[in-house]
């Protein structure tokens, strides 16, 4: 066996490189800084660009400009930085600018604890930008996922022309661990679909059964317009209610309907169990340990580990839950994703355990919750 | 080259607004420079200056308030061959102040046109960063409490390569704009004009007054010589070209077989300067050389060089799920700072845990087995204690072997450090 030893943040950097990332900009913030360090090591020496913005708003702004000039871009921060990104995230959503945004979550609220982990931004990532349109959020469990899901994130950003979040956690991003890089099967690398040159280019025209417009880079021979204003296919401001409604519906549907193609998850289903534990992120690792111990003790449970958090994989959750009487949701916050589970499974008993003290939820605690409720 | 004005979308400014003159002058400047629309990117801010991109047949990016320079910087870094021009009002100057200052410091080849009409026109004539203290504006008395800023002097002090203060009414405006666009570096142009829809309704301001005002303000042309330096994009490319690509992640082959196959949890409790994190990494690399999976979590204060330093390591034959420490098999205790941070863990230990403690270090009462390491006696320095403790473990064939340790040190270091480690191994083996 041949193994590498790296922290989740380094794995995200190498994943970005594998996906074709050519531009990174960030502002130093624990626990995301080592992504910036990694990109600084990886990009400029290969002709790519890594910048340190004067703040988070500038960092993501650089990325949006570079993405519109045709490069694959990524930025990385933590909760306080995501807060500052908000206006730019809504720009990327509404104006369909591909970008990968890593949120290495730390204990909040506010500046909170720089070196303590949490999954406290899970609803914030979904709802933390104006307009309320859906976004894609992927949640890694370990460094291997950090590598693989980052490649998927770039592909999704390119296909759907949208921001894609990696919801990491200090406990994954700053923990070093062994990774078997040779065993990771990367998906084919996808690049944004370019507009054919046999017709006039309209920057937001959506052709055929496509859900996202064809792309041309700013600087192309044909002129490209990008705007954060409510726009029609030509990229100019519009007040036409039917054009506006049609575009808003498409922006929603391209993510919601497109979601069927990118539901990442793992399941460990044990025969004749009546409890399904649903979890995600670093907590999934403790849940696996707890489930193994319970199996040994003759009290087996099944596990569903979600790696696509948004859009909510509704069909998956409904279908997987069918045989179970009881659902137990465990997450490293005071109850965020459990809202989605309860919404989807109104006729099931849904128990919840959350913890927000900067410590990992232990397998022992999870066992107690499963056994004693 | 002909005009780049978009005939289908003529300017829509309030009658008498000086922005319209600037649109014409900018088009004139593009023509003087012989530029085609595809060579130009207009990045526009918010407010009336945010309409500029729609009047031209060029590439365009219109985004959030105050952030135009951020998009422009990304575009220019990706495509240094394009002429990137930013239009922004005195409102954008205020809200995006940090970006203006940083762009001056960067000297990136962008042109920033500040359409300075001394108030927020579009939202009702509120005061901006350039509103005179005695003006009557939509912000009540508030502008009387703040000094207006002279952006030209600020920009020059911040390192802008080219600074110009112009009136929207001067005859050579197009010529001056062409100079700014042609400058290879960051150029900032403060173009003072009239907001007829708001500002001049209550404040007397005429082209003549603007010209007189500019005449009275300190000159700014000297900044070009003072701030003369390399342009950011080309400088970046030069620096990048000097770097060699980082080597791929280290791949470590399993070459040893360990008798112990159970999950091993090891905690090293020390203080800053004891190379605790490095020792933790070496232990993990050693484990990997025996085909083990490993995890390493470190805990230290945000400020460095003082306080605790703790490394928590897990080594296991199978993939590691939970990365926390339940029952450590070994605790290496080297400093009171580290011990103080794990009192609860230490109190809960049972006989199965082996504590290696530096001699003289107080360990709270515990059921765990304790071995004292008298590294002082052998004159081993504090910064080597963590590594020496690993050597001790290896000599006792617990968790790792000396061969694994040597391999790990060889993976992590080269040259002198490898030699020093060999000496340390001899030293520790001897006192055993």
Image (tube, coloured by chain):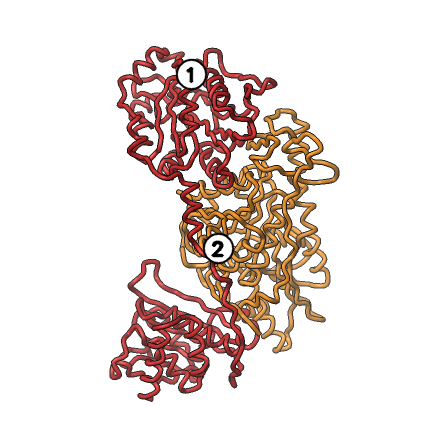
Chain colours: A orange, B red
Inspect this view and state whether residue A352 appears: no
Residue B292: x %, y % from top left: 53, 76
Badge 2 density bin: few <14, some 14–19, many ≥20, Cα 10 Å: many
**Left or right: where does residue A31 sit relative to residue B320?**
left
Q: Quadrant of the N terminus of chain A?
A: bottom right
Q: Is residue A60 above or below residue A232?
A: below
Disc 1 from disc 2: Cα separation: 49 Å
Q: Is residue A189 above or below residue A144?
A: above
Secondary structure state at the residue bearing disc 1? loop
Same subunit, tags 1 and 2: no
**Left or right: where does residue A254 sit relative to residue B81?**
right
Residue, disc 2: A42
The residue under the point 41% across, 37% down is B108
Front-most of residues B256 and A340: B256
Of marks 1 and 2, the one in the foreground: 2
Residue B341: x %, y % from top left: 35, 68
What label sits on residue B195 in the rendered view?
Answer: 1
């Amino acid at each position: 066996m041949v193994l590498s030893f790296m922290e989740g943040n380094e794995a995200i950097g190498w994943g970005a490189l594998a996906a074709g990332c050519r531009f990174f900009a960030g502002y130093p913030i624990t626990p995301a800084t080592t992504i910036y360090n990694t990109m600084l090591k990886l990009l400029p020496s290969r002709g790519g660009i890594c910048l340190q913005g004067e703040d988070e708003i500038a960092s993501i702004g650089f990325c949006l400009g570079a993405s519109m000039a045709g490069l694959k871009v990524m930025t990385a921060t933590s909760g306080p930085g995501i807060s500052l990104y908000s206006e730019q995230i809504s720009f990327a959503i509404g104006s369909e600018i591909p970008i990968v945004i890593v949120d290495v979550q730390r204990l909040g609220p506010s500046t909170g604890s720089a070196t303590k982990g949490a999954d406290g931004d899970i609803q914030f990532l979904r709802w933390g930008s104006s307009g309320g349109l859906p976004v894609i959020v992927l949640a890694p469990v370990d460094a291997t996922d950090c590598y693989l899901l980052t490649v998927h994130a770039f592909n999704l950003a390119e296909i759907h022309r949208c921001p894609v979040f990696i919801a990491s956690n200090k406990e994954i991003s700053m923990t070093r661990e062994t990774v078997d890089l040779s065993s990771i099967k990367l998906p084919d690398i996808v690049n944004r679909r370019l507009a054919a040159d046999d017709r006039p280019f309209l920057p937001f025209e959506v052709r055929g059964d496509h859900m996202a417009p064809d792309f041309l880079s700013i600087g192309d021979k044909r002129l490209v317009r990008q705007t954060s204003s409510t726009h029609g296919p030509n990229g100019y401001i519009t007040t036409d209610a039917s054009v506006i409604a049609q575009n808003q519906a498409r922006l929603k549907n391209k993510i919601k309907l497109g979601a069927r193609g990118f539901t990442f998850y793992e399941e460990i289903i044990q025969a004749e169990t009546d409890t399904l534990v649903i979890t995600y992120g670093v907590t999934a690792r403790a849940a696996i340990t707890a489930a193994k111990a319970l199996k040994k003790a003759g009290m087996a449970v099944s596990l569903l580990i979600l790696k696509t958090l948004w859009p909510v994989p509704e069909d998956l959750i409904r279908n997987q839950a069918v045989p179970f009487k009881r659902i137990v949701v465990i997450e490293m916050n005071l109850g965020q994703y459990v809202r989605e589970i309860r919404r989807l499974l109104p006729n099931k008993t849904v128990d919840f355990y959350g913890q927000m003290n900067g410590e990992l939820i232990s397998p022992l605690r999870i066992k107690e919750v499963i056994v004693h409720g | 080259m002909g005009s780049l004005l978009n005939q289908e979308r003529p300017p829509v400014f309030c009658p008498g607004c000086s922005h319209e003159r600037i649109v014409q002058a900018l088009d004139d400047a593009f023509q003087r420079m012989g530029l085609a629309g595809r060579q130009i990117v207009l990045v526009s801010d918010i407010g009336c200056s945010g309409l500029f991109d729609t009047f031209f047949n060029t590439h365009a990016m219109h985004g959030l308030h105050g952030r135009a320079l951020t998009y422009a910087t990304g575009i220019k870094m990706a495509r240094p061959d394009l002429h990137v021009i930013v239009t922004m009002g005195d409102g954008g100057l205020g809200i995006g102040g940090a970006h203006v200052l940083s762009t001056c410091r960067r000297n990136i080849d962008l042109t920033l046109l500040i359409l300075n009409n001394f108030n927020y026109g579009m939202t009702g004539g509120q005061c901006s960063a350039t509103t005179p203290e005695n003006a009557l504006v939509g912000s009540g008395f508030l502008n009387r409490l703040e000094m207006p800023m002279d952006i030209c002097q600020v920009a020059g002090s911040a390192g802008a390569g080219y600074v110009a203060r112009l009136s929207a009414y001067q005859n050579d405006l197009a010529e001056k704009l062409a100079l700014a666009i042609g400058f290879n570096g960051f150029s900032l142009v403060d173009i003072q004009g009239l907001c007829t829809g708001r500002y001049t309704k209550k404040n007397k301001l005429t082209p003549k007054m603007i010209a007189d005002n500019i005449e009275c303000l300190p000159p700014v042309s000297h900044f070009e010589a003072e701030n003369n330096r390399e342009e950011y994009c080309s400088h970046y490319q030069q620096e990048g070209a000097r770097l060699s690509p980082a080597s791929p992640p280290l791949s470590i082959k399993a070459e040893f077989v360990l008798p112990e196959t159970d999950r091993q949890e090891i905690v090293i409790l020390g203080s800053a300067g004891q190379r605790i994190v490095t020792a933790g990494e070496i232990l993990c690399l050693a484990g990997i050389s025996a085909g083990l999976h490993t995890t390493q979590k470190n805990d230290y204060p945000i400020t460095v060089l003082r306080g605790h330093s703790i490394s928590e390591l897990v080594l296991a034959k199978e993939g590691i799920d939970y990365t926390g420490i339940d029952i450590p098999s070994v605790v290496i205790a080297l400093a009171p700072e580290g011990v103080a941070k794990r009192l609860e863990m230490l109190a809960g230990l049972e006989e199965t845990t082996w504590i290696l403690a530096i001699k003289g270090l107080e360990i709270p009462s515990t059921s765990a087995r304790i071995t004292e390491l008298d590294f002082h006696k052998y004159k081993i320095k504090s910064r080597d204690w963590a590594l020496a403790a690993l050597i001790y473990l290896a000599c006792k064939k617990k968790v790792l072997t000396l061969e694994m340790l040597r391999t790990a040190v060889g993976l992590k270091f080269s040259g002198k450090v490898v030699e020093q480690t060999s000496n340390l191994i001899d030293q520790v083996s001897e006192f055993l």
